[in-house]
Image (cartoon, rainbow, N blue to C red):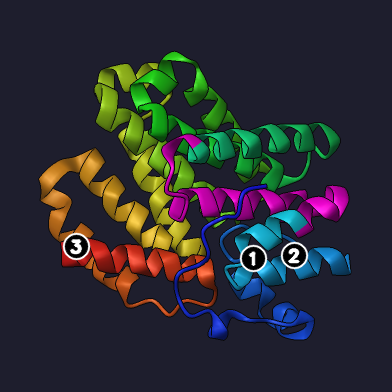
Amino acid sequence: MAKWTAFPYDNSAFRYDAASLKKHWARLHAGDAEPWPKDTAVQQAWIHFHAGEFQQAHEAGLAAGSAGITVANKAQAIYANYLEKKEKTKLEMFLAVAERAEAQQAEEPKNANAWYWQAYAIGRYGQGISVAKALAQGLGSKVKTALETTIQLAPKHADAHIALGAFHAEVIDKVGKLLGKTQGADTATGLKMFEQALKLNPGSAIAMIERANGLVMLEGDKRLKEAEALYADAAACQPMDAMEYLDVELAREELEE
């Protein structure tokens, strides 16, 4: 496997061992509601993930077998989204995650994150090829169904609420309210999802960022001030791991523009 781009920031604050990982697990996984792994090889993969060692996390997750698929998928999806420079590689990675997640659903239909990572990967892939193209290929309904299934299985899955809010917002923004309806997208549901996500995970920078984007997509310039305030809040968040650091950086860069 080609060498992935390294996490470009200092990660010394994000180096956990098994004991500190367990202690901070609930906070670190407030977004994805992932249960604590009993398997020590999987714990090790998560230690790599939180430190921003995404390639090691991905490889260690795959090597750990079925219990490590979620960490392998999360590591590859987050890496592809934030750090992979080549668009072609990024899209290939999203497809690989989606494929593994779908196979995982067949093995573990009640595993919420098997549905979530499929939705996340297809959603990001769809943004990459263009939302209109993705909808024409029927990917929209796949994303929506997978996210609704995630929430059904794990009602406190904040990240799935964010992603479902983003689905409604993106579809309406790209094809309009009328055509959006045919895809099952509506403004009220989108706004509700973003709100719910922040209730479930109030300290989440990515929930603030996506809500800010969603408000402007769904309701236009009248929500711009509110969106800017959400970005400022996101930029002020204290990251607990590498992924959160990348979210906070994203908010800071947006504010500087």
Mark 2 crowdedness (10 Å alpha carbons): few <14, some 14-19, many ≥20: many
Q: Amino acid at mark 3?
A: Glu
The quarter of the rendered structure image containing the C terminus is bottom left
Q: CA distance from mark 3 to mark 1?
A: 30 Å
Mark 1 crowdedness (10 Å alpha carbons): few <14, some 14-19, many ≥20: many
User: Which SS class for mark 3?
Assistant: helix
Check contact, mark 3 vs mark 1: CB within 8 A. Answer: no
Q: Nearer the viewer, residue 182 or 122?
A: 122
Mark 3 crowdedness (10 Å alpha carbons): few <14, some 14-19, many ≥20: some
Q: Which mark is residue 45?
A: 2
Earlier sequence position, callout 3 versus callout 1: 1
Q: Amino acid at mark 1?
A: Phe
Q: Is residue 84 magenta?
A: yes
Foreground disc of the pair 3, 2: 2
Which picture quadrant has residue 61? bottom right
Question: Which residue is located at x 27 percent, y 22 percent?
Answer: 175
Q: Is residue 39 magenta?
A: no
Q: CA distance from mark 3 to mark 2?
A: 36 Å
Q: Which residues are magenta?
A: 60-88
Residue 53 lies, in percent from the top left, at: 62, 67
Residue 211 lies, in percent from the top left, at: 33, 53
Q: Which mark is residue 228?
A: 3
Which picture quadrant has residue 34? bottom right
Q: Amino acid at mark 2?
A: Ala
Q: Nearer the viewer, residue 54 or 116?
A: 54
Q: Which residue is mark 1?
A: 49
Q: Which mark is residue 8?
A: none
Q: Is residue 62 above or below residue 173?
A: below
Magenta stretch secondary structure, dominant:
helix
